[in-house]
Amino acid sequence: MRGIRSGLAAAAVLVLAAGTAHAQTYPSKPVHLINGFQPGGPTDVIGRIVADWLTKAMGQAFIVDAKPGAAGNIAGEYVAGSAPDGYTLYLAAWSALIVNKVLYKNLAYDPDTALTPITIVAYNQLPLVVSVKLPVVNFAEFIGYAKAHPGKLNHGSPGIGSQPHLADELLKQRLGFQSEHVPYRGSAPFSQGLARGEVQWGFDAANTALAGVSAGTARILAITGTKRDPILPDVPTIAELGVDDSDWAGYFSLVGPAGMPRGVVDALFYTLWRGLKDPEVVQRLRNLGLHPMGTPPDESGRIFARDRANWAKVVRNSNIKVE
């Protein structure tokens, strides 16, 4: 994520005139914001934060609708097939935009071409957690233990193809140790599996990791990213610990169907960009372990393209398949 935020203010100024002008006519009726996972999960909560701000700022109801299933693919297909008028939008998890195309061979739509980028709403750095039952207290000890006990470790994640899962596999590739993946259905079940001793380590969301530390079942050894996370200021980054190119952030993005009018895209981006500076919105996101972002539409598209190329290699090199 480094180097991106510096240009956001200038970009927002460039779209201010277009966004303000178009906002006089858009939206003229309620807007549906699609969530690809179950109500109550992270994307649903983030969607409601976004919808609350846009409703207040744009004067029409933004309604969060859940269309769960197939790791966000049902929602993505629904949005991709909707009219590109700005009245059906998608609050997309990282995996749905970045890796589902390579994981699901029969995906009914192409995230590269069937969706219009609006903005990356928020990102999260990923803490590396280990079970307290593992006899390690820092990153170096963990890597040493993993290399000394090949085939003895299991690592967990919130699901196959999730950002924590791919970060797990990339760490294994970079540092050369063996571990078997155990997928769970979300961060909370993964944390419970760690507590029960079914798995010994894995990357996770900050709020779930902190809950495990508070419960006495997990230790946090490091975190992805190039700068320390304000939520975990005493935790070193993996980059600090010698792992190059480890800015492995997950993110949640607002997109719409391909072919949306640029004025509508700009109006949504600029309005939400302002919201991501609102103290209440910022606090609600940070309560989830997230940091507001607000990348311009074109920059968001470039980030998606870059990450799809990079992470497709990880999927293929790790032979990750959806059962």
Image (spheres, grey):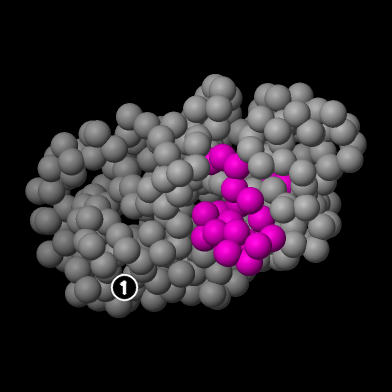
Range of magenta residues: 201-223
Are there few (<14), some (14-19), or many (20+) residues within 10 Å of tag 1?
A: some
Residue 27 position (above or below residue 250): below
Q: With 152 as the anchor, is 185 left or right in this view?
A: left
Residue 144 position (above or below residue 30): above
Judging by the rendered image, the residue that carries numbered circle 1 is 52
Q: Quadrant of the N terminus?
A: top left
Residue 131 in the image: x percent, y percent?
73, 52
Residue 317 in the image: x percent, y percent?
74, 28
Disc count in the image? 1
Residue 194 in the image: x percent, y percent?
74, 58
Q: Residue at x 32, y 43 (%)?
A: 295
Instruction: For residue 54, say whether it is visible.
Output: no
Q: With 56 as the anchor, is 141 left or right in this view?
A: right
Residue 189 position (above or below residue 303): below
Q: Is 173 in front, or is 128?
A: 128
Q: Residue at x 29, y 38 (%)?
A: 5
Residue 179 in the image: x percent, y percent?
82, 38
Q: Is 91 in front, or is 175?
A: 175
SS class, disc 1: helix
Q: Residue at x 23, y 62 (%)?
A: 279
Amino acid on which disc 1 is placed: Asp
Q: Is 162 in front, or is 202?
A: 202
Q: With 294 as the anchor, is 1 left or right in this view?
A: right
Q: Is residue 202 magenta?
A: yes
Instruction: For residue 126, say whether it is visible.
Output: yes
To which quarter of the image does residue 234 belong?
top left
Q: Is 253 in front, or is 129?
A: 129
